[in-house]
Amino acid sequence: MGAPISRRGLLRASAGAAAGLALASCGDGGPAIPLADNAKVELPDYVPYKGVKPALAGTKGGVLNGYRHYPADPARAFPDGPPAKGPGVRVMTLTFNPVPPPQGRNPYWRALNEQLGTDLDVEIVPVGDYPNKFSVVVAGGDLPDAMLVLPTASQQPAMFNALFEDLTEHLSGPAVREYPYLANIPTDAWRWTVYNGGIYALPMPRANAGSIMFYRSDRFKERELDPNPGDFKEFQQLCRDVSDPKHSRYALGDPITTLNFMMEMVGGPNIWREKNGKFTFWLESEEIKEALDAARKLTQEHLLHPDAYSVVGKFKDWFGNGQIALHYDGNAGWNDFYRQYAQNNKGLEIDGMLAPGFDGGKGSHWAGYSSFAVLAIKKAPKSRVRQILRLANAMAAPFGTDAYKLRKYGIEGHDHERRGTDPILTPDGTTETALPTGFITDAPLSLYFPERPDVVDRQHSFQTRAAEVLVRNPTEGIYSETNAKTFGALKLKTDDVLKGIMQGRNKLSSLDETVRMWRREGGDQMRAEYEKAWASLHG
């Protein structure tokens, strides 16, 4: 079960063992509320921030605004003073990075608190530990003021009803305008926050671009290769041409994301497909066998790294260090690859490749989820809820403001040095600004890379082309309890079979029994839950 966002796949795979504890202290959360009530919820008004003009304009189709440079005179985000004055706020969230120094040894964190006007106390949990930590905290009943809730958390409607604040009166429709930076978050991201006929959380907006087939454009240029294949056969030849096994250089790494790219070529479902209210999982689709056969051909020709099927967690390093030339990863990886690998890999350049149609013409591109997770606020008096919403509004201050610059780049002269008008992180800044503010809430993402402004043009060009062939997952913002409980375990089982087919260990016909297993062990129930929820929303 490849997922369109690799981080999301990781979280789903790790969440299943924790699910049973999540509502130990909640009972049933009260009477069930009809799903149709969710369709009646008025989502927050969308009021885009217009304080800074992008060099490359975004679109309603999901292309992000692009900025080559930070404004020389950033707009004041909070002209009336610190926005979240009041008692300290305790938040529990996750990180994919090393935990930053604590407040006492972190000038950046203290400066952020000064700007906010409160003591933001963040309990930072490594991503792999978060599902279990979340379950233990919820079961124990000692909740922080706000906490990140993953889409894989169990019994979400009952949990939100029992433990967390209904924010509808604060955020629905025009009410959100009291929090202008939350109003700047696009509507699609808010769909993840609706439960029990109300708005129960805040989104963490992400890019429509989802995952991208990155390619090492420096390696392609060395060999004078065209990075725009017209069909699968041309892609296959491109993989041959960029490979050099004698020097330990290969085309591809991760087998499952290679299969995802093949599915984009054949026009397969982005995990699920909806037609007339009926849902089809990608493993059941007409396209899957053609995609699997294509991935098997690439494997048989040794176009994947020889360790591709025996290791995990090495694919990014292989790509950054030049052992593979193509790597399918999340949109955020574009800047990260340069920051992490360019210093030791002279000439490193990266671009994004769109999947062609398998037999020619246009392929497709799987959209990512519009929100990574959500932030729920513990039940509290209205005055306290409003303070936390003001804090969340501050954490969503957009690109071009002084607050965004501090939140992302820290203190000038310590956390960053200025190059022209652009903040360039120092080693101290890289460490200190690892405080995971983007996993509390965040501004809509922007295309901006202060170290390499030219890269922004490539990113914007890719997103513009991808928007023309974007395929969304119809389950986005729809909750399935069975999916939350079983996705991780089923993914492990099905991935093993898929890899076996690609390697030649399993026959292509073994997919049929795997699909039957998937249906028996939760797939059919997921489908029923999604179809019921879809019908309630779309009538």
Image: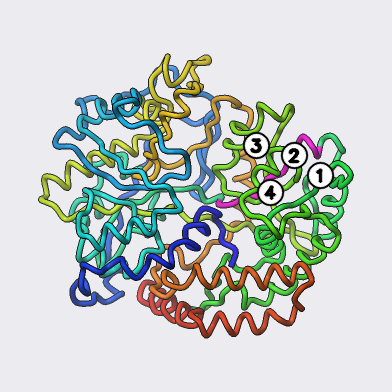
**With respect to residue 259, does 445 lie above or below?**
above
Q: Which mark is residue 322?
A: 2
Determine whether, in the image, residue 101 is placed left or right of residue 89: right
Q: Nearer the viewer, residue 121 or 466?
A: 121
Pick the quarter of the image with the C terminus. Answer: bottom left
Whichever of callouts 2 and 1 sits on the residue coming sooner in the sequence is 1
Q: Position of residue 169 (x, y in %)?
A: 18, 55
Circle 1: is it few (<14), some (14-19), or many (20+) Cα within 10 Å?
many
Pick the quarter of the image with the N terminus. Answer: bottom right
Determine whether, in the image, residue 329 is placed left or right of residue 409: right
Query: Which residue occupies 48% across, 48% down?
Result: 60
The CA span between labels 2 and 1 is 7 Å
Q: Which residue is mark 3?
A: 458
Q: Nearer the viewer, mark 1 or mark 4?
A: 1
Q: Which residue is mark 4?
A: 327
In the structure shown, which secondary structural element does the residue marked by tag 1 occupy? loop
Q: Mark 3: which amino acid?
A: Arg
- Please tell me in which quadrant of the rendered image residue 449 appears: top right
- Please tell me in which quadrant of the rendered image residue 387 appears: top left
